Amino acid sequence: MAQLLLIEDDERVRTTLMRSLRDLRHQVASAPDAMTGLRAAIDHRPDLVVLDLGLPDLDGAQMLRMLRGVSDVPVIVATARDDEDEIVRVLGSGADDYVVKPFTAKQLDARIQAVLRRVGGPAADPTVTVGPLRIDPRGRAAHLDGKPLELSPKEFDLLHYLAARAGEVVAKRQLLTDVWDLPFGGADKTVDVHLAWLRRKLGETAQAPRFLHTVRGVGVKLVDPAGGAA
Ligand code: CA
Protein backbone atom coordinates (compact mmCIF):
# COMPACT_ATOMS: atom_id res chain seq x y z
CA MET A 1 0.00 0.00 0.00
CA ALA A 2 2.58 2.51 1.09
CA GLN A 3 6.36 2.78 0.87
CA LEU A 4 7.63 2.88 4.40
CA LEU A 5 11.00 3.57 5.91
CA LEU A 6 11.57 1.96 9.28
CA ILE A 7 14.40 3.45 11.33
CA GLU A 8 15.05 1.11 14.23
CA ASP A 9 18.30 -0.08 15.76
CA ASP A 10 16.99 -3.24 17.41
CA GLU A 11 17.49 -5.86 14.75
CA ARG A 12 14.92 -8.25 16.17
CA VAL A 13 12.21 -5.56 16.32
CA ARG A 14 13.20 -4.32 12.87
CA THR A 15 13.02 -7.74 11.22
CA THR A 16 9.74 -8.70 12.87
CA LEU A 17 8.10 -5.40 12.07
CA MET A 18 9.30 -5.41 8.48
CA ARG A 19 7.87 -8.86 7.95
CA SER A 20 4.51 -7.94 9.49
CA LEU A 21 4.26 -4.68 7.57
CA ARG A 22 5.07 -6.50 4.35
CA ASP A 23 2.33 -8.99 5.17
CA LEU A 24 0.05 -5.96 5.37
CA ARG A 25 1.17 -5.21 1.79
CA HIS A 26 3.46 -2.29 2.53
CA GLN A 27 6.83 -1.89 0.88
CA VAL A 28 9.34 -1.50 3.65
CA ALA A 29 12.92 -0.25 3.63
CA SER A 30 14.84 0.00 6.87
CA ALA A 31 17.79 1.68 8.50
CA PRO A 32 19.54 0.77 11.77
CA ASP A 33 20.53 4.29 12.81
CA ALA A 34 19.65 7.94 12.34
CA MET A 35 22.27 8.90 9.78
CA THR A 36 21.53 5.92 7.53
CA GLY A 37 17.85 6.71 8.01
CA LEU A 38 18.28 10.32 6.93
CA ARG A 39 20.10 9.23 3.81
CA ALA A 40 17.42 6.65 3.04
CA ALA A 41 14.67 9.24 3.54
CA ILE A 42 16.34 11.44 0.93
CA ASP A 43 17.21 8.62 -1.49
CA HIS A 44 14.04 6.50 -1.32
CA ARG A 45 11.44 9.24 -0.74
CA PRO A 46 9.20 7.02 1.38
CA ASP A 47 5.51 7.84 1.92
CA LEU A 48 6.01 7.60 5.65
CA VAL A 49 8.80 7.12 8.18
CA VAL A 50 8.49 5.03 11.34
CA LEU A 51 11.16 6.37 13.66
CA ASP A 52 12.36 4.68 16.82
CA LEU A 53 13.26 7.38 19.32
CA GLY A 54 15.98 5.39 21.02
CA LEU A 55 18.67 5.33 18.32
CA PRO A 56 22.36 4.94 19.06
CA ASP A 57 23.68 7.94 17.14
CA LEU A 58 21.14 10.77 17.56
CA ASP A 59 18.54 11.88 20.06
CA GLY A 60 15.01 11.39 18.67
CA ALA A 61 14.01 15.06 18.71
CA GLN A 62 17.33 16.00 17.07
CA MET A 63 16.75 13.36 14.41
CA LEU A 64 13.24 14.69 13.77
CA ARG A 65 14.54 18.21 13.28
CA MET A 66 17.20 17.01 10.84
CA LEU A 67 14.64 14.95 8.96
CA ARG A 68 12.28 17.94 8.81
CA GLY A 69 15.17 19.95 7.38
CA VAL A 70 15.32 17.72 4.32
CA SER A 71 11.82 16.27 3.94
CA ASP A 72 8.11 16.79 4.64
CA VAL A 73 7.56 13.05 4.89
CA PRO A 74 5.02 12.07 7.57
CA VAL A 75 6.68 10.56 10.63
CA ILE A 76 5.32 8.22 13.28
CA VAL A 77 7.65 7.91 16.24
CA ALA A 78 7.94 4.73 18.24
CA THR A 79 8.82 5.44 21.82
CA ALA A 80 9.63 3.02 24.61
CA ARG A 81 8.28 5.36 27.25
CA ASP A 82 4.67 6.26 27.78
CA ASP A 83 5.88 9.63 28.97
CA GLU A 84 3.71 12.62 28.25
CA ASP A 85 6.55 15.15 28.23
CA GLU A 86 8.52 13.05 25.76
CA ILE A 87 5.52 12.59 23.49
CA VAL A 88 4.66 16.29 23.57
CA ARG A 89 8.30 17.07 22.75
CA VAL A 90 8.46 14.82 19.67
CA LEU A 91 5.06 15.94 18.40
CA GLY A 92 6.37 19.50 18.78
CA SER A 93 9.49 18.56 16.81
CA GLY A 94 7.46 17.58 13.77
CA ALA A 95 6.22 14.03 14.34
CA ASP A 96 2.73 13.32 12.99
CA ASP A 97 1.82 10.61 15.48
CA TYR A 98 3.38 8.14 17.89
CA VAL A 99 3.11 4.57 19.11
CA VAL A 100 4.29 3.34 22.49
CA LYS A 101 6.32 0.14 22.64
CA PRO A 102 5.41 -2.62 22.70
CA PHE A 103 2.95 -2.22 19.85
CA THR A 104 1.64 -4.65 17.25
CA ALA A 105 2.10 -4.23 13.52
CA LYS A 106 -1.68 -3.97 13.29
CA GLN A 107 -1.76 -1.00 15.67
CA LEU A 108 1.07 0.64 13.78
CA ASP A 109 -0.70 -0.03 10.47
CA ALA A 110 -3.86 1.68 11.77
CA ARG A 111 -1.78 4.74 12.70
CA ILE A 112 -0.04 4.66 9.31
CA GLN A 113 -3.38 4.57 7.48
CA ALA A 114 -4.73 7.43 9.58
CA VAL A 115 -1.67 9.63 9.05
CA LEU A 116 -1.59 8.93 5.31
CA ARG A 117 -5.30 9.71 5.03
CA ARG A 118 -4.70 12.97 6.84
CA VAL A 119 -1.85 14.03 4.56
CA GLY A 120 -3.66 12.74 1.45
CA GLY A 121 -1.08 10.03 0.90
CA PRO A 122 -1.29 6.80 -1.04
CA ALA A 123 -3.70 5.16 1.38
CA ALA A 124 -6.34 7.41 -0.10
CA ASP A 125 -6.93 6.33 -3.69
CA PRO A 126 -6.47 9.47 -5.80
CA THR A 127 -8.41 8.07 -8.76
CA VAL A 128 -11.19 10.39 -9.85
CA THR A 129 -14.36 8.89 -11.29
CA VAL A 130 -17.10 10.93 -12.94
CA GLY A 131 -19.73 8.66 -14.44
CA PRO A 132 -18.04 6.58 -17.16
CA LEU A 133 -14.86 8.68 -16.90
CA ARG A 134 -12.02 7.40 -14.76
CA ILE A 135 -8.80 9.32 -14.18
CA ASP A 136 -5.79 7.94 -12.37
CA PRO A 137 -3.36 10.79 -11.64
CA ARG A 138 -0.64 8.48 -10.34
CA GLY A 139 -0.52 6.38 -13.48
CA ARG A 140 -1.49 9.44 -15.57
CA ALA A 141 -4.11 7.34 -17.32
CA ALA A 142 -7.67 8.25 -18.23
CA HIS A 143 -10.40 5.87 -19.35
CA LEU A 144 -13.80 6.51 -20.81
CA ASP A 145 -16.21 3.57 -20.70
CA GLY A 146 -13.19 1.41 -19.86
CA LYS A 147 -11.30 2.46 -22.99
CA PRO A 148 -8.04 4.40 -22.61
CA LEU A 149 -8.03 8.02 -23.75
CA GLU A 150 -4.98 9.21 -25.65
CA LEU A 151 -4.32 12.58 -24.08
CA SER A 152 -1.45 15.03 -24.28
CA PRO A 153 0.07 15.94 -20.89
CA LYS A 154 -1.84 19.25 -20.78
CA GLU A 155 -5.10 17.66 -21.87
CA PHE A 156 -4.66 15.13 -19.09
CA ASP A 157 -3.93 17.84 -16.51
CA LEU A 158 -6.94 19.85 -17.65
CA LEU A 159 -9.26 16.85 -17.57
CA HIS A 160 -8.00 15.77 -14.15
CA TYR A 161 -8.32 19.27 -12.74
CA LEU A 162 -11.90 19.66 -13.93
CA ALA A 163 -12.93 16.11 -13.01
CA ALA A 164 -11.57 16.55 -9.48
CA ARG A 165 -13.95 19.54 -9.23
CA ALA A 166 -16.87 17.92 -11.03
CA GLY A 167 -20.00 20.03 -11.01
CA GLU A 168 -18.07 23.19 -10.10
CA VAL A 169 -17.68 26.04 -12.57
CA VAL A 170 -13.99 26.84 -12.96
CA ALA A 171 -12.90 30.18 -14.43
CA LYS A 172 -10.52 30.05 -17.39
CA ARG A 173 -8.25 32.40 -15.51
CA GLN A 174 -8.04 29.85 -12.73
CA LEU A 175 -7.23 27.10 -15.22
CA LEU A 176 -4.40 29.19 -16.64
CA THR A 177 -3.04 29.68 -13.15
CA ASP A 178 -3.43 26.14 -11.86
CA VAL A 179 -3.05 23.97 -14.97
CA TRP A 180 -0.70 26.09 -17.06
CA ASP A 181 1.12 27.88 -14.24
CA LEU A 182 0.44 31.16 -16.01
CA PRO A 183 -0.85 33.45 -13.28
CA PHE A 184 -0.14 36.60 -15.25
CA GLY A 185 -1.40 37.25 -18.73
CA GLY A 186 -2.07 33.82 -20.14
CA ALA A 187 -4.55 33.86 -23.00
CA ASP A 188 -8.03 32.38 -22.57
CA LYS A 189 -7.58 31.07 -26.09
CA THR A 190 -5.06 28.52 -24.77
CA VAL A 191 -7.80 27.08 -22.60
CA ASP A 192 -10.36 27.16 -25.42
CA VAL A 193 -8.05 25.31 -27.77
CA HIS A 194 -7.32 22.59 -25.24
CA LEU A 195 -10.97 22.30 -24.32
CA ALA A 196 -11.79 21.78 -28.00
CA TRP A 197 -9.17 19.04 -28.28
CA LEU A 198 -10.37 17.43 -25.09
CA ARG A 199 -13.97 17.51 -26.31
CA ARG A 200 -12.98 15.73 -29.48
CA LYS A 201 -11.27 12.99 -27.48
CA LEU A 202 -14.29 12.66 -25.23
CA GLY A 203 -16.44 12.33 -28.35
CA GLU A 204 -18.44 15.51 -27.86
CA THR A 205 -18.70 19.02 -29.25
CA ALA A 206 -19.30 22.45 -27.75
CA GLN A 207 -22.74 22.40 -29.39
CA ALA A 208 -23.61 18.98 -27.98
CA PRO A 209 -21.62 18.72 -24.74
CA ARG A 210 -21.71 15.70 -22.47
CA PHE A 211 -18.98 16.22 -19.87
CA LEU A 212 -17.64 19.67 -20.61
CA HIS A 213 -20.08 22.52 -20.26
CA THR A 214 -19.09 26.10 -20.92
CA VAL A 215 -20.81 28.65 -18.76
CA ARG A 216 -20.63 31.79 -20.83
CA GLY A 217 -18.66 34.58 -19.24
CA VAL A 218 -17.86 32.47 -16.19
CA GLY A 219 -15.89 29.38 -17.13
CA VAL A 220 -16.27 25.69 -17.66
CA LYS A 221 -17.47 22.75 -15.65
CA LEU A 222 -17.21 19.03 -16.01
CA VAL A 223 -20.28 17.01 -15.13
CA ASP A 224 -21.39 13.39 -15.16
CA PRO A 225 -23.59 13.17 -18.27
CA ALA A 226 -25.93 10.89 -16.29
CA GLY A 227 -26.25 13.59 -13.66
CA GLY A 228 -24.37 11.88 -10.84
CA ALA A 229 -21.70 14.45 -10.09
CA ALA A 230 -23.44 17.57 -11.39
CA1 CA B 1 16.02 1.55 19.96
Image (cartoon, rainbow, N blue to C red):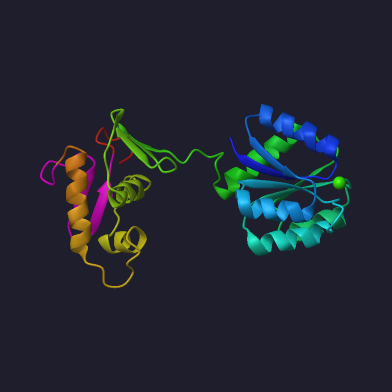
Q: Which residue is drawn at 58% across and 43% down?
A: 117
**What residue appears at the point 26 percent right and 32 percent down from the top-left corner?**
226
- The front one of 27 and 206 is 27
Residue most extreme to the left: 207
Where does residue 147 sit, x and y in percent of width and height? 28, 29
The residue drawn where x is 17% and y is 37% is 203
Q: Is residue 104 in view from this perspective?
A: no
Residue in view at x 42 percent, y 40 percent? 139
For this rendering, which residue is in front, 81 or 1? 1
Quadrant in which residue 58 is drawn:
bottom right
Q: Where is residue 103 in the image (x, y as percent from the top left)?
A: 81, 36
Q: What stretch is highlighted in magenta?
A: 205-223
* Left-right relation of 175 to 75: left
Q: Kindly tell me whether residue 172 is visible in this rendering.
A: yes
The magenta stretch spans residue 116: no
Q: Quadrant location of the C terminus?
A: top left
